[in-house]
Image (cartoon, rainbow, N blue to C red):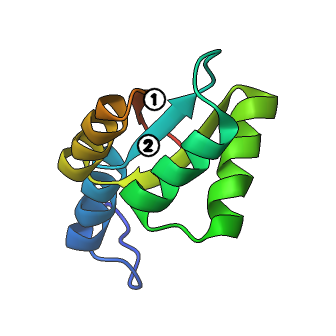
Amino acid sequence: MAETNPHHSPAEATATATALQDAWRVVVLNDPVNLMSYVVLVFKKVFGFDETRARKHMLEVHEQGRSVLWVGEREPAEAYVFTLQQWHLTAILESDETG
C-alpha cells in the first residue's frame, strides 16, 4: 500500500510541477554594439527598474556575458524578449529548469 504525505496533497504536487514547467527566463546577452548607458535606459523603460538595478544588470551582461532579467510564465516572457529585441538588444528565452 502506498504511503501518502499528510502535509502535501496530490493536487498540490501537480500544481507545483505545473508551476515549475511554466517558469521561463528572459536573458539578455552581451553584444559589441549597444552602449552601456543605452542598455540601462532600455532596462528602466521595459522593466521599470530603478537606476541601481538597471546598472547592476547591465554590468552583469557586460562582465559575464549575460543577465537574467525576469523569470515567470512563458507568454509574458516571450513578450519581454520581443520588446527587448525591438530595442535592438540580444535577448533570449530559456526554460528555468532550476524551478
Q: Residue at x 52, y 34 (%)?
A: 28
| Element class at badge 2 | strand
Where is mark 2, residue-wise?
A: 25
Q: Which mark is residue 89?
A: 1
Q: Is residue 15 left or right of residue 38?
A: left
Q: Earlier in the sequence, mark 2 or mark 1?
A: 2
Report the residue that reaches farthest toward the right: 63
Residue 43 image offset from top left, x and y in percent: 50, 52
Residue type, label 1: Leu
Q: Could you tell me the amino acid type at mark 2? A: Arg
- Is residue 96 visible from the viewing direction of this image? no
Identity of the residue furthest to the bottom in this view? 7
Task: Tell me the quadrant of the picture where the N terminus can be found.
Answer: bottom left
Seen from the viewer's position, the closer of residues 36 and 80 is 36
Name the mark nearer the viewer: 2 or 1: 1
Picture residue at 65% right of the left edge, 67% below the top: 51
Extreme residue toward the top, this view: 32
Q: CA distance from mark 2 to mark 1?
A: 15 Å
**Quick one: 74 or 12, which is closer to the camera?**
74
| Residue 87, picture quadrant | top left
What mark, if any, has residue 73 been given in the picture? none
Q: Nearer the viewer, residue 31 or 9?
A: 31
Q: Where is residue 35 drawn, in percent x and y?
A: 64, 32
Kind of element beneath mark 1: loop
* Residue 26 falls left or right of residue 81: right
Question: Residue at the location (38% across, 67% down)?
Answer: 3
Q: In this rendering, is residue 50 above or below 44? A: below
